[in-house]
Image (cartoon, rainbow, N blue to C red):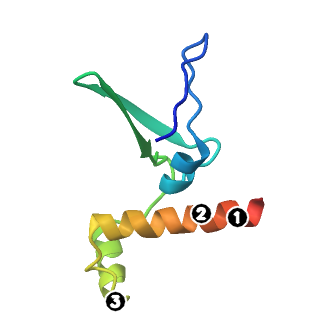
C-alpha cells in the first residue's frame, strides 16, 4: 500500500504502482466517490455526442462477426488496461 497526502489545494498524487495497475495516463478522467469514509477513484471515459457513431446494433453485429460478443466487462477492462500500459511504454 502506497501512501500519499492531500496538498494545499486538496490535490492528491496517485502513486505510480496504482496508476500503472489501472492504466491511468495524464489527462484521464476519474470519478471520485465517497462511501463510508472511503474515497474511491474510478477511471472514466467521456464520449463526445457530436461525433457520429454507428448504432448499438451495428456495433453488436460487428462484435459478433469478430467473435468478440462473449467478452465480459471484466475482460474488456483488462484489454483496455493492457492497451494503455503498452501505449505508456511506447511514449516513455
The quarter of the displayed image where residue 15 is located: top right
- Residue under label 3, please give it: 65
Q: Position of residue 54 (x, y in %)?
A: 40, 67
Q: Is residue 8 left or right of residue 57?
A: right
Q: Nearer the viewer, mark 3 or mark 2?
A: 2
Foreground residue among 30 and 10: 10
Q: Position of residue 5 (x, y in %)?
A: 55, 22
Separation (CA) of disc 3 from disc 2: 27 Å
> Sequence-wise, which precedes: disc 3 or disc 1?
3
Foreground residue among 63 and 90: 90
Separation (CA) of disc 3 from disc 1: 31 Å
Q: Is residue 84 left or right of residue 73?
A: right
Q: Residues within 10 Å of mark 1 (few under 14, many from 20)?
A: few
Question: Marks 2 and 1: in contact by CB < 8 Å?
Answer: yes
Separation (CA) of disc 1 from disc 2: 6 Å
For the point 26% across and 70% down, the residue is 72
For the point 35% across and 72% down, the residue is 59
Residue 75: in sight, yes or no? Answer: yes
Foreground residue among 88 and 29: 88
For the point 44% across and 45% down, the residue is 43
Quarter of the picture containing the C terminus is: bottom right
For label 3, the SS is helix
For label 1, the SS is helix
- Residue under label 2, please give it: 85
For the point 40% across and 35% down, the residue is 31
Which residue is situated farthest in the top direction here?
8
- Residue under label 1, please give it: 89
Q: Residues within 10 Å of mark 3 (few under 14, many from 20)?
A: few
The quarter of the displayed image where residue 75 is located: bottom left
Amino acid at each position: 500500500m502506497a501512501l500519499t497526502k492531500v496538498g494545499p489545494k486538496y490535490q492528491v498524487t496517485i502513486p505510480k504502482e496504482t496508476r500503472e495497475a489501472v492504466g491511468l495516463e495524464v489527462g484521464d478522467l476519474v470519478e471520485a466517490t465517497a462511501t463510508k469514509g472511503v474515497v474511491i477513484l474510478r477511471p472514466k471515459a467521456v464520449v463526445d455526442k457530436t461525433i457520429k457513431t454507428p448504432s448499438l446494433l451495428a456495433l453488436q453485429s460487428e462484435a459478433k462477426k469478430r467473435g468478440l460478443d462473449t467478452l465480459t466487462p471484466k475482460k474488456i477492462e483488462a484489454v483496455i488496461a493492457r492497451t494503455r500500459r503498452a501505449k505508456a511504454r511506447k511514449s516513455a
